[in-house]
Image (tube, grey):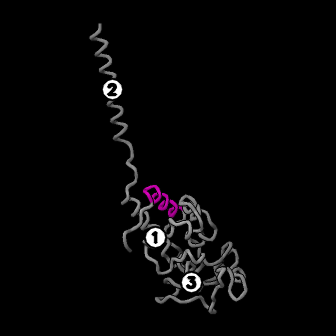
Amino acid sequence: MANRVLMLFGLIACATAAMLMASTSGAQAPPSKADGLEAWEKAFEVFSHPRCVNCHVPEDNRPRWSGPSYGAKAQYHGMNIIADDTRKKAAGLPCTSCHGVSNLPFAKGAPGAPHWALAPVEMVWWAKSSRDICEQIKDPARNGDKSLDEVVEHVRSDDLVQWGWNPGPGREPAPYSSAELADFLRNWVNSGAPCPVAG
């Protein structure tokens, strides 16, 4: 009788071990640093695109016109537009004086989206490297005082960010989509938000 009980316990232990091994082998490995860097480089394709960098400009406060639709050489915004330090006005007039809440319906007409303005100066991306922008995105002092989770939600839902994929006739949209960009950033965050060593 004792032997049969021991045999039964042995069978139960073996079955339990087999189930645990099967469960462990089927578990998904956590994302690696390499996964995070791959996700980041896709996000950088968006952040470095003209639809983004043309308004994430340096301290000169001059919006850019760049990208294939504007020719080989980047230009400053026409009419010598230079924003004031608020980055929301030029020559005393709000950017929204010309830029409404939607695009004008003809080629290269004034683009528009809610709360149209330049990005804050601490969020400059123009001519910045992948590493520079990566470190900036992680720094609340340079990303609009956002956590990384809030950054993900910002690119997924902010109206002005969404304009990058609907820039109006005559302008090429940013690559991927806002949902894909949010997914790239989420994967990057889940991998520890690694930044490239250089570049």
Q: From the top left corner, tell me how far across and down residue 43 is, in percent.
A: 47, 67
- Pick whichever, 162 or 151, lies toward us: 151
For the residue marked with disc 2, what is the amino acid? Ala
Picture residue at 42% right of the left edge, 68% below the top = 41
Disc 2 marks which residue? 15
C-alpha gap between disc 3 and disc 2: 67 Å
C-alpha gap between disc 1 and disc 3: 21 Å
Disc 3 marks which residue? 59
- Pick whichever, 58 or 77, lies toward us: 58
Q: Secondary structure at mark 2?
A: helix
Q: Residues within 10 Å of mark 3 (few under 14, many from 20)?
A: few
C-alpha gap between disc 2 and disc 1: 49 Å
Depth check, mark 3 against mark 2: the one in front is 3
Picture residue at 29% right of the left edge, 20% below the top = 10
Q: From the top left corner, tell me how far across and down residue 60 is, in percent.
A: 57, 86
Q: Secondary structure at mark 3?
A: loop
Q: Residues within 10 Å of mark 1 (few under 14, many from 20)?
A: some
Q: Residue furthest bottom?
A: 79
Q: Within the image, what quadrant is residue 20 found in?
A: top left
| Residue 17 among magenta residues | no
Counting residues from the start of the chain, the first of labels 2 and 1 encountered is 2
For the residue marked with disc 3, what is the amino acid? Glu
Q: Residues within 10 Å of mark 2 (few under 14, many from 20)?
A: few
For the residue marked with disc 1, what is the amino acid? Phe
Left or right of residue 109, residue 32 in this image: left
Would you say the magenta stretch is mainly helix, strand or loop? helix
Counting residues from the start of the chain, the first of labels 1 and 3 encountered is 1
Q: Which mark is residue 131?
A: none
Disc 1 marks which residue? 44
Per the rendered image, the range of residues in magenta is: 179-192
